[in-house]
Image: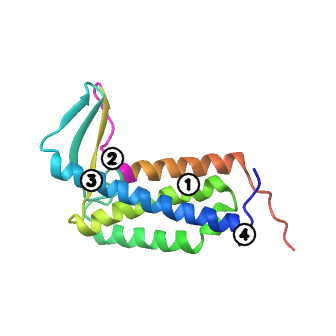
Amino acid sequence: MNKIVPGSPEERKILLQSLSLSLAVALLDQICKAAVENFLLKPVELIPGFFNLVIVRNTGAAWGIMSGQRWLLTVISAAFLVGAVLFFRNLTEGWRERFYAAALVVGGVIGNTADRIWRGGAVLDFLDFYLGSWHWPAFNVADTAICVGVGIFILSSWCRPEKKRENP
């Protein structure tokens, strides 16, 4: 697969698809969170010994890091989003999968930032996986999109290393 040429019709198409993917992730995340808030009255064990639906309000970032720092986390997220938009082409380096990877991350960041702004400063997590006494922290659709996007980006970087540019 060839690189996407900057300014080409193909790039415009991929940018529109990426924007659509980001918005779809953020919207799906918010729809799922609204459904959980409105209909989940108590934890529900869906797969015994492995998976529950729960309501966990995380006032920090991943695993509760920086707990209670609502506005700082919101500012960091906003700065990330501005940087991602401004440097989107540079981040993707013309590779199609990196456009989609970046779009997943952006959509996830939008979803969790919306929570910090409109859900009282806490991100709503509801997917709860565990195995015996090993328990993974609860997470949500936005978190999943961020992790998948970062994973795709890392794999792409390993599979498509850029040639080092020589100094002029």
Stretch in magenta: 132-142
**Residue 41: within the magenta?**
no
Of label 3 and label 1, which has the lower sequence position? Answer: 3
Of label 1 and label 4, which has the lower sequence position? Answer: 4
Q: Nearer the viewer, mark 3 or mark 2?
A: 3
Q: Is residue 46 left or right of residue 153?
A: left
Question: For the view shown, which residue lies furthest in the right direction?
Answer: 168
Magenta stretch, main secondary structure, is loop
Point out which mark residue 8 bears. 4
Q: Is residue 52 left or right of residue 19?
A: left
Q: Name the residue beneath numbered marker 1.
A: 101
Q: Name the residue beneath numbered marker 3.
A: 33
Q: CA distance from mark 4 to mark 2?
A: 38 Å
At 49% from the left edge and 58% from the top edge, which residue is drawn?
Answer: 21
Q: Amino acid at mark 4?
A: Ser
At 49% from the left edge and 56% from the top edge, which residue is drawn?
Answer: 104
Image x and y of residue 52, in percent: 25, 35
Q: Which quadrant of the rendered structure holds the C terminus?
A: bottom right
Q: Name the residue beneath numbered marker 2.
A: 139
Looking at the rendered structure, the secondary structure element under dot 1 is helix
Color encoding of the figure: rainbow
Neighbour class for label 2 at 10 Å: few (<14), some, many (≥20)? many
- Examine the image and state in which quarter residue 124 appears: bottom left
Q: Is residue 147 left or right of residue 115?
A: right
Q: Nearer the viewer, mark 1 or mark 4?
A: 4
